[in-house]
């Protein structure tokens, strides 16, 4: 097998194409099988999947409706948070912007549905490079700025 930036990015593209890879999710299981098959294709021996019991959370439905009549607000479920009963929840709501400590301290959130704008961290390549023991990037293809939004850092 020949390694190059192009082939590496193609491999990453194939893995990313399976979708979000959280433990227990179908997309993660497909990725595991793909990796096993790929390892065998490139000649690694004695490869296998190791079964690991996993408790996981996956939303069946996500909806935020405000007012009467209800107006749907664009929203998404935050992984590994608590869930709401099937009948939903009715309560007053309070908006806390990006959810800073100051915003929570200033708001009366008791018994209310708290609405916040999600802010995701960014993966910065210069920080990752600084902590690396070894980097092989002969074509200098890794930029020093933001690589992508780290949407699991919530």
Image (spheres, rainbow, N blue to C red):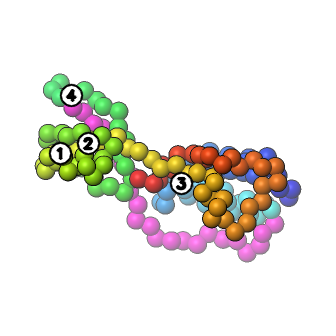
For this rendering, which residue is in front, 26 or 149?
A: 149
15 and 148: which is toward the camera = 148
Q: Nearer the viewer, residue 25 or 141?
A: 141
Between disc 3 and disc 1, whose residue precedes?
Answer: 3
Q: Which label's residue is closer to the chain start, 2 or 1? A: 2
Residue labelled with disc 4: 70
* Main secondary structure of the magenta stretch: loop
Q: Where is residue 74 in the image (x, y as percent from the top left)?
A: 35, 33
Quadrant position of residue 45: bottom right
Residues under numbered marks 4 and 1 in contact, where contact means CB atoms less than 8 Å apart:
no
Badge 3 local density, few (<14 within 10 Å), some, or many (20+)? some
Asked if disc 4 and disc 3 are in contact, CB closer than 8 Å, the reply is no
Residues drawn in magenta: 43-66
Quarter of the image for the N terminus: give it: bottom right
Q: Name the residue under label 2.
A: 96
For the point 79% across and 46% down, which residue is it?
6
Determine whether label 2 and label 1 are within 8 Å by CB. yes
What's the residue at 44%, 67% (across, down)?
54
Disc 3 marks which residue?
A: 21
Q: Distance between the residues labelled 4 and 3?
A: 33 Å
């Amino acid at each position: 097998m020949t390694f190059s930036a192009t082939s590496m990015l193609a491999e990453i593209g194939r893995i990313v194409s399976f979708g979000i890879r959280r433990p227990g999710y179908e997309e993660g299981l497909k990725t595991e099988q793909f990796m096993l098959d790929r390892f065998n294709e490139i000649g690694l021996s004695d490869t296998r999947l190791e079964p690991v019991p996993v408790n996981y959370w996956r939303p069946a439905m996500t909806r935020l409706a405000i007012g009467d009549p209800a107006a749907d607000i664009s929203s998404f479920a935050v992984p590994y948070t608590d869930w709401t009963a099937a009948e939903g929840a009715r309560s007053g709501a309070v908006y806390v912007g990006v959810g800073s400590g100051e915003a929570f301290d200033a708001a009366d959130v008791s018994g209310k549905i708290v609405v916040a704008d999600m802010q995701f961290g960014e993966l910065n390549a210069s920080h990752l490079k600084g902590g690396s023991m070894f980097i092989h990037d002969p074509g200098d293809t890794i930029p020093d700025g933001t690589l992508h939004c780290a949407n699991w850092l919530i």
